[in-house]
Image (cartoon, rainbow, N blue to C red):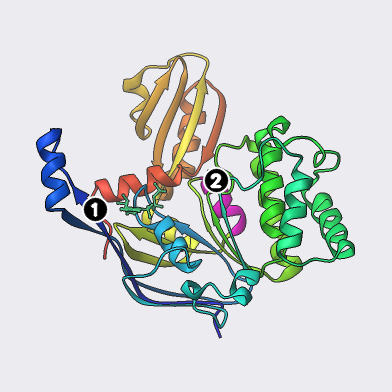
Amino acid sequence: MPTIDVNQLSKRYPIAIKEPGLGGTLRHFWRRQYRLVDAVQSISFHIEPGEVVGFLGPNGAGKTTTLKMLTGLIHPSSGTVRVGDQVPFQRRTEFLQDITLVMGQKQQLLWDLPALDSLRINGAIYGLSDKEFRYRVDELTEMLALQGKLNQPVRKLSLGERMKAEMMAALLHRPRVLFLDEPTLGLDVNAQVAVREFLRDYNRRYEATILLTSHYMADITALCRRVLLIYQGRLIYDGSLEGLLDRFAPYREVTVDLATGCDAATLSRYGELESLEGCTARLIVHRDTLTQTVARLLGDLDVQDLTVSDPPVEEVIGRVFAAGSAER
Ligand SMILES: Nc1ncnc2c1ncn2[C@@H]1O[C@H](COP(=O)(O)OP(=O)(O)OP(=O)(O)O)[C@@H](O)[C@H]1O
């Protein structure tokens, strides 16, 4: 039985239309008018126990709305969702004890208190005994390398430490299903890596099922073998990450630092020139011709440094949709 079972799920938001000015306000008061936004349109997918799945899409595609329906924060307009054997919107205790929702831009820890105090509140809410609370805090402190940080007021922690402490608060009740909305948002590279490693560890240790949204492709490549791609409320891809990149990003980003000869006309012969700052150029090169192009660059030009990377997921998706090549 899948852990997450979503069938034909839709969410339509009514948005009040109000004309500007006093007249508009008065008309709005007497006769409200609404337009409807189809934020999520008939999506279906199933996630098996222990899977880590990336949930990708451009801004406004419907990711957060979907996560809110899966965690029972909002009611679907139509369709069904089951998480474990629970219907999220009923918000039964068994359901709440089994899941967590982490939103990178929201925090639950109290700013002026040490994180440990907020954790104690969570421990009490979930009915953990003192012994169990201490055991879990010690375990998570070690997994997250937060030794010595939990007694400081949260406002004195670095962003990365705060995010880890947030993660701790969200996982203290040891949920088996994790919904993570941009868990590494704004973190520096080291902190991003630490959070990813922790999530991988948690997934293995507790066979947790994870659905994760992120605009950082590195989060997705490090953690998820399977991805879902949502665009304008519709699910347009459900499959392996490799398949997604083959289909949506058949190109790579090549960054070259040149000692001499850094002119746009020359560089454009090797790929689509994205940017040229001083003697550092970013080129977009088709994957099929990557090896030959890199060899030509190294052979023809005075290259000091060269790196090849996947373009950011936002850029990949933006390009695909700008080109109108997304199949529905
Ligand atoms: N409470 C709301 N009322 C009305 N419209 C909403 C509400 N929440 C979201 N929307 C709209 O629904 C659509 C989907 O929004 P959603 O937040 O789910 O997208 P998202 O994929 O999470 O985007 P982002 O990556 O920017 O967070 C957007 O058009 C948004 O403006």
Q: Quadrant of residue 128?
A: bottom right
**Residue at image point 47% right, 63% down:** 73
- Principal secondary structure, stretch drawn in magenta: helix
Placement of the N terminus among the 4 image quadrants: bottom right
Q: Residues within 10 Å of mark 2 (few under 14, many from 20)?
A: few
Q: Is residue 163 magenta?
A: no
Please give the residue where the numbered disc 2 appears in the rendered image: 106
**Residue at image point 70% right, 62% down:** 125
The kind of residue on which mark 1 rests is Ile
Which of the numbered marks, if any, corresponds to residue 15? 1
Judged left or right of residue 86, residue 264 is: left
Label 1 CB less than 8 angstroms from ligand 1: yes
How many marks can you see? 2
User: How far across and how far down the image is residue 87, in percent?
Assistant: 49, 78
What are the residue bounds of the magenta stretch?
216-223
**Residue at image point 10% right, 45% down:** 27
Q: Quadrant of residue 209?
A: bottom right
197, above or below 159, in the image: below
Q: Is any atom of residue 135 visible in this view?
A: yes
Secondary structure category for the residue under label 1:
strand
User: How far across and how far down the image is residue 239, in percent?
Assistant: 45, 68
Q: Is residue 219 magenta?
A: yes
Q: Residues within 10 Å of mark 1 (few under 14, many from 20)?
A: few
User: How far across and how far down the image is residue 183, in percent?
Assistant: 58, 49
Judged left or right of residue 236, residue 143 is: right
Residue 37 or residue 192, whichever sits in front: 37
Judged left or right of residue 293, residue 273 is: left
